[in-house]
Amino acid sequence: MPRPRGKVPSYCHHKASGRAVVRINGRDHYLGFYGTPESYERYERQLAEWRLRGEERVAQQASGAIFDASASLMVNALLLRYMAFAETYYVDAQGQPSKELTDMKYALRPVRKLYGRILARDFGPLALKAVRQYMIEEGKLCRGVTNARINRIRRVFKWAVSEELAPKGTYEALRAVDGLRRGRTTARETEPVRPAPQMAVDAVINAVSPQIAAMIQVQQLAAMRPCEVVAMRACAIDMSDDIWIYQPYEHKNRWRGYDRHIPLGPKAQAILKPFLTLSTTAYLFSPIAAEQWRNGQRTKDRKTPMTPSQTKRKQIKKAPKRPKKDHYSVPAYARAIKYGIRKVNRQREKENRPQIPHWCPLQLRHSRATEVRKQYGIEAAQVVLGHARADVTQVYAERNFDAAIRIARETG
């Protein structure tokens, strides 16, 4: 029986090869191993391209003329073309998708859901405001995240104008929509990031593996970003002088053409030396080494010796489903700190002591920035943080009100 026209092609299993397959217009497209997330992602991509071809054909037939993308392109088709561009643009040095690509996908979901089937030329300021309100009500997003996602949507239409896929005035019209202001929106507000309490930091250092403890200390001493400390390797550190210079290959502003040089003083050097190995390309902080340390601690803390059967099971234990990587990711680093905080608080609860507050790796950068600014001024904090502008440093370094207090005491 022939397939009904317009029916969505199905995700199928090619049993002979164990691969997933979808048949579109009589042609099989293999998607990778059946049931894997990658195969489903390729399936959705094939469906999106299939719908795109159908929408363009309908628009061309309705116009009765040569197809003009800027006049007849649907929003769904525009988003699909942009994501094809973004997948090659937002990548790191290894060619892997960057976090910005994921953030862009999140930002475009409500656009696709609410306005995917309208013409791109009809997407204007009112539509953008409606998408923003949907984010606030359905996504429960805070004001800052909402503004950031709206800016990403504007960026898509800016690209569309540059590719002549949208009318020239589309982007300028969307720029007329102001960002949400504090106190003038129903979007929830979040507390600004504060420096991590030193007492809480010290407590966690004593409760985590040596690798995580070293990362915390080095990050705080050098005011690094979390992504910079997790990627430390000896080959990226110049040790020819008394002050080592760490130059991360990947950093936040690399795409802008900026270089990042991080001085490492005697304290940071003393922390790093135990992790330096003969391999200069190996990551200094390894989750595999941390797991071995934890297993050693469990063996050391055993109250009874292992039985022969337990020893045998340990030797023939299968490989884990999710083996440890050669270095920490930023989320894994944050989770390790979170687990350390829980461990400390469980012990403090048994001892009837007050709980320590939760903190995240980024707060260590704030702590160091505040300390440097207080002792050496805003320009010194700017240099330590690696900022191009001092106004950005204001976000990280808490204002030092000692001078204002002293003036009030003397003259007020």
Image (cartoon, rainbow, N blue to C red):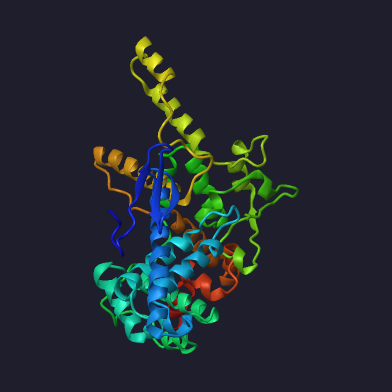
Outermost residue to the top: 308
Task: Please say whether residue 72 is visible from this viewpoint.
Answer: yes
Q: Is residue 382 above or below residue 31?
A: below
Does residue 214 sit above or below 223 in this rendering? Answer: above
Q: Nearer the viewer, residue 52 or 93?
A: 52
Q: Nearer the viewer, residue 275 or 322?
A: 322
* Residue at the extreme right: 240
Judge whether residue 360 can be spotted in this image.
no
Q: Position of residue 76 (x, y in %)?
A: 38, 72
**In x, y percent, where is residue 133?**
28, 77
Residue 148: name its quadrant: bottom left
- Which residue is painted at 42% across and 88% down in the image? 173
Give the x, y percent position of residue 379. Answer: 60, 71
Query: Looking at the picture, how far across and down is residue 163, in whole percent?
Result: 54, 78
Residue visible at 47% across and 37% down in the picture: 324
Q: In the current view of this chain or complex, which residue is farthest to the front?
A: 1
The correct choice, above or below, for 28 with respect to 211 in the image is below
85 or 11: nearer the viewer: 11
> What is the number of callouts on the image?
0
The quadrant of the image that shows the C terminus is bottom left
The vertical placement of 105 against 296, above or below, is below
Residue closer to the observer: 186 or 66: 66
Residue shown at 42%/56% (left/top)?
A: 196
Instruction: Identify the residue shown where x is 43% and y is 71%.
Output: 79
